[in-house]
Image: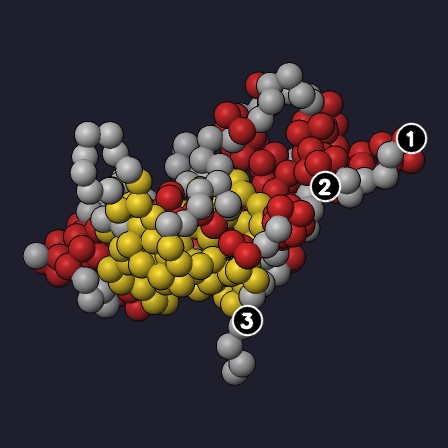
Amino acid sequence: MTAPETILRTSQLYKEFRVSGRQDPFVAVDRVDLEVPAGRTLAIVGESGSGKTTVTRMMLGLLEPTAGTIELNGRDLAQLTTREMFEQRRQMQVVFQDPFSSMNPRLRVADIVAEPLVTHEVALRGRRGRRERDERVVELLTSVGLDADDRTRYPHEFSGGQRQRISIARALALRPKLIILDEPTSALDVSVQSQVLDLLGSLQDEYGLSYVFVSHNLAVVRRLADQVAVMRSGAVVESGPVHQVFDEPESDYTRTLLGAVLEPDPRRSRRRRRAAA
């Protein structure tokens, strides 16, 4: 079987910050190598402060690496002009942990979902453009399980799970190849988490999307991801297929993380604790 192409790759990615009153810089990300196969999901896991959010912020171009490279579709992002980077952003979108904080509360859902189309001048101007844009918004809302009439409402009128669906619809607007999911289910209750994960899985199959999934919830990672990278203190301590890393972890740190996962079956819980000891 032919291996899938790599849509995103980081090589020796390194990020340090200067801290006031400290002589040596703080190393947030330390020589991280990652690959995201096309149409697959790479999960990045680790405790708070492990560096996973800093990695994704560099992927999105919100932080500049101190050293190392990030390639999207084989192109080094650091070598792109401002215009070229703007074009590349159409291929990579993001869904944040708190959907409400990423939405303008004064805008209706139709304007929120259509915002990327306007920013990147995808839609035509004038009356015809507004009609096409509205049709695209309806298509996007329907694809994430919402109703066409929802486009006239405001964010505060929706539940947390519905707002996350709106965020996903907005991320799909430009038909990207890669979506970075930053703890997209952590603010949702368990039943709604399951619905959003099912939605993400079906959208990946339908559109051939690639995901970078940042999470501390290992049960969610096992369900959604194909590959996983475990980070600690800015470095990747273990990576590989999810089933391999979770079922036969090589790192003591990975075993500790897995041992902390709540297990409804007491016998499996005891076996996991013994394995982590």
**What separation in Å lies between label 1 and label 3 (alpha carbons)?**
41 Å
Q: What amino acid type should be assigned to the residue bearing mark 2?
A: His
Q: Are marks 1 and 3 in contact (CB under 8 Å)?
A: no
The C terminus - image quarter: bottom left
Q: Are marks 2 and 3 in contact (CB under 8 Å)?
A: no
Q: Are marks 1 and 2 in contact (CB under 8 Å)?
A: no
Q: Which residue is mark 3?
A: 5
Q: Residues within 10 Å of mark 1 (few under 14, many from 20)?
A: few
Task: Tell me which label, 1 or 3, sits earlier in the chain.
Answer: 3
- Give coordinates of residue 248: x percent, y percent: 23, 68
Secondary element type, mark 3:
loop
Residue 29 visible here: yes
- Give coordinates of residue 127: x percent, y percent: 91, 30
Q: Mark 2, mark 3: which one is toward the viewer?
A: 2
Q: Which residue is mark 2?
A: 120
Q: Residues within 10 Å of mark 3 (few under 14, many from 20)?
A: few
Q: What amino acid type should be assigned to the residue bearing mark 1?
A: Arg
Q: Which residue is mark 1?
A: 127
Residue 157 visible here: no
Q: Residues within 10 Å of mark 2 (few under 14, many from 20)?
A: few
Secondary element type, mark 2:
loop
**Residue under the point 65% across and 52% down:** 84
**Residue under the point 59% across and 54% down:** 80
Nearer to me, 88 or 256: 88
- Give coordinates of residue 85: x percent, y percent: 61, 49
Q: Quadrant of residue 204?
A: bottom right
Nearer to me, 83 or 107: 83
